[in-house]
Amino acid sequence: MRRGTWGVVLATVTVAATVPTVGWALTTTTKPRIQILGGASFEANRFIQDKQRFNKDVYQVKSGAKIQINSKTKEEPHTVSVVSRRDLPKSVADFGKCYRGGICAQLEKDHGAPENGEGPPTNPLVDKGATGFDARGDSIVIDPGGKGRFTVSAKKGRTLYIMCVIHPWMQAKIKVK
Ligand SMILES: [Cu+2]
């Protein structure tokens, strides 16, 4: 199993929200939030266990909403990346595929992750498609213990599949209302 080991992003990432707001924003009552939780441990010659995860499996969010991301994990960076359903690894073997020509490799490149895994990515935000998160490859890097924000520009009725391309078992859905 190979995991990315991107270094710390020096600046806190805040994504400018530039999606036009057409009235709906005033009716939003709760701020949608993705929290990143958990940690890793191992027992020598037995196992490694990594419980880093998104706090929910499914997020229900209005089109146009800004989602705050808040990482409680202090050791490692993460990404929140929009992928296709077929990109989502279903087995540990699939992690390798993700890094060999899959979306994990693509986003390592698009984010400018350093070749040796050390140091910050040069491009903490990748915005494909329309502005905001609506397309495969839209992705934000979150520092260890850090925060970020993105706007869901996908239209009502769509489901965005998200994953962390550093820890590819971290997978969830955003259902756009
Ligand atoms: Cu992660």
Image (tube, grey):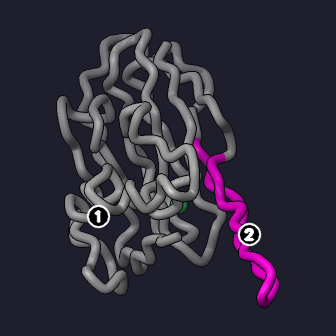
Q: Residue furthest bottom?
A: 44
Q: Position of residue 34 (x, y in %)?
A: 58, 43
Q: Which residue is mark 2?
A: 49
Answer with left or right where residue 74 lies relative to residue 84. right
Name the mark on residue 108: 1
The answer to whether residue 40 is seen in the rendering is yes
What residue is drawn where x is 40% and y is 80%? 7
Name the mark on residue 31: none
Question: Is 108 or 22 nearer to us in this picture?
Answer: 108
What residue is drawn where x is 37% and y is 33%? 84
Answer with left or right where residue 68 lies relative to residue 140. right
**Region of the chain picked out in magenta, as a range:** 34-54
Q: Is residue 115 magenta?
A: no
Q: Is residue 41 magenta?
A: yes
Q: Position of residue 83 (x, y in %)?
A: 37, 39
Answer with left or right where residue 162 lies relative to residue 15. right
What residue is drawn where x is 51% and y is 21%? 175
Q: Residues within 10 Å of mark 1 (few under 14, many from 20)?
A: many
Please determine whether, in this image, residue 151 is positioned above or below residue 175: below
- In the rendered image, which quarter is residue 60 located in? top right
Q: Position of residue 24 (x, y in %)?
A: 42, 12
What residue is drawn where x is 50% and y is 58%? 147
Nearer to us of marks 1 and 2 is: 2
